[in-house]
Amino acid sequence: MYPALDLSIPAAQKWSPGQEKFLVRMGPVFNSAYCPDVRLRTDRLVSPASDADTAALVGIAPGLVISAEHDILREEARRYAQRLHAADALIGHLDLEGVGHAFNMGGAGRDVVRPVYEEIAEAVRVAFV
């Protein structure tokens, strides 16, 4: 639901004031799990939101992008949403204010989480109709 979309940038460089810091410490762990070979982290299949990937996304499956205001992954989610939009493959982009990474498990209220799950369910329903 909230993957890193640009492993070419170290987690510590993604942080800015107002964002959560726990992913600065955990980012390297997740990046190593997703892609152990550091040399491959610029590959477009590993980092589809990287500035280095300028290839067209023609034919890519449509996607729903969800980002959160206090998440260090927010900017790369926005970049990826823009890329999907340019490829006419963006179902939607929910950019949630006032919450951070793992918002659905980390304290966001039902009034925030439920509509997100409803959007996800609708996107899946439309994709398979």
Image (cartoon, helix red, strand yellow):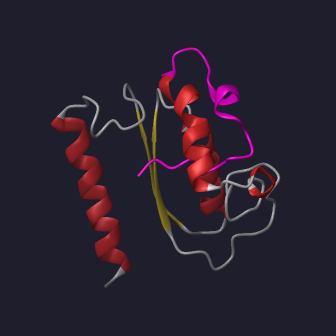
Q: In the displayed image of the protein, which residue is found farthest to the bottom?
A: 129
Residue 21 percent across, percent down from the top left: 52, 21
Which sits in the foreground, 123 or 13? 13
- In screen coordinates, is 2 left or right of 108? right
Residue at the (74%, 50%) spot, across then down = 50
- In screen coordinates, is 102 left or right of 88? left
- In screen coordinates, is 57 left or right of 72? right
Residue at the (45%, 57%) spot, across then down = 92
Residue 46 percent across, percent down from the top left: 67, 59
When asked about the image quadrant of residue 105, the answer is top left
Q: Is residue 55 above or below residue 2?
A: below
Residue 85 percent across, percent down from the top left: 60, 60
Residue 54 percent across, percent down from the top left: 81, 60
Residue at the (48%, 22%) spot, across then down = 20
Q: How many marks?
A: 0
Residue 29 within the magenta-colored segment of the rendering: no
Magenta highlight range? 1-21
When asked about the image quadrant of residue 42, the answer is bottom right
Magenta part, dominant SS: loop
Residue at the (78%, 48%) spot, across then down = 51
